[in-house]
Amino acid sequence: IYPSVFREATKPTCPPSATPRVAPKHVLTATIEHTIPERGVKVSAGGLGKVLDQMLREHPEGILSLVHPMFGDVDYGEKELYKDFEIVVDGKVQVVKVYKIESELKGLRRVW
């Protein structure tokens, strides 16, 4: 086991490119594990939550959209109903409600 300690963000070392690197303006992430720090929400199912926590702290300016299921025993606080979707599962129509929560921190707009 080789533990790592991150003290600051570092630029990746990549081979030179013929075109300048373009930073993404909008990143979409879909996981079961999720954290909403300002609401005190933290759902863990393994270890990816630590990676997501670091993304929330260190992601550059832009929009970070986080898609995850809602768990019945977690209080997510007030949220906006974004849209209802009808999907078919095992031949039966199911309605999926999609809610939206937004926040901003240090130029990063976070959308759950």
Image (cartoon, rainbow, N blue to C red):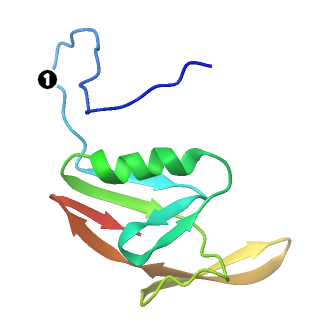
Residue 13 lies in what quarter of the image? Answer: top left
Which residue matches tag 1? 20
Query: Residue drawn at (31%, 75%), measured in percent from left and top?
Result: 102
**For residue 99, above or below residue 18:** below
Query: Residue drawn at (16%, 19%), measured in percent from left and top?
Result: 19
Q: Provide the secondary structure element on which disc 1 rests.
A: loop
Between 89 and 45, the residue placed more toward the observer is 45
Where is residue 85 drawn, in percent x and y?
58, 80
**Total count of labels:** 1
Query: Residue drawn at (21%, 13%), measured in percent from left and top?
Result: 17
7 with respect to 70 (left or right) = left
Where is residue 56 drawn, in percent x and y?
35, 54
From this viewpoint, which residue is outermost toward the right?
Answer: 90
Where is residue 28 drawn, in percent x and y?
41, 54
From this viewpoint, which residue is outermost toward the top?
Answer: 15
Structural crowding at the residue carrying mark 1, measured as other residues with C-alpha within 10 Å and reported as few (<14), some (14–19) or many (≥20): few
Query: Residue drawn at (57%, 46%), measured in percent from left and top?
Result: 48
Query: Which quadrant, please, contains the C terminus?
Result: bottom left
Label 1 is placed on what type of residue? Pro
Between 12 and 74, the residue placed more toward the observer is 74
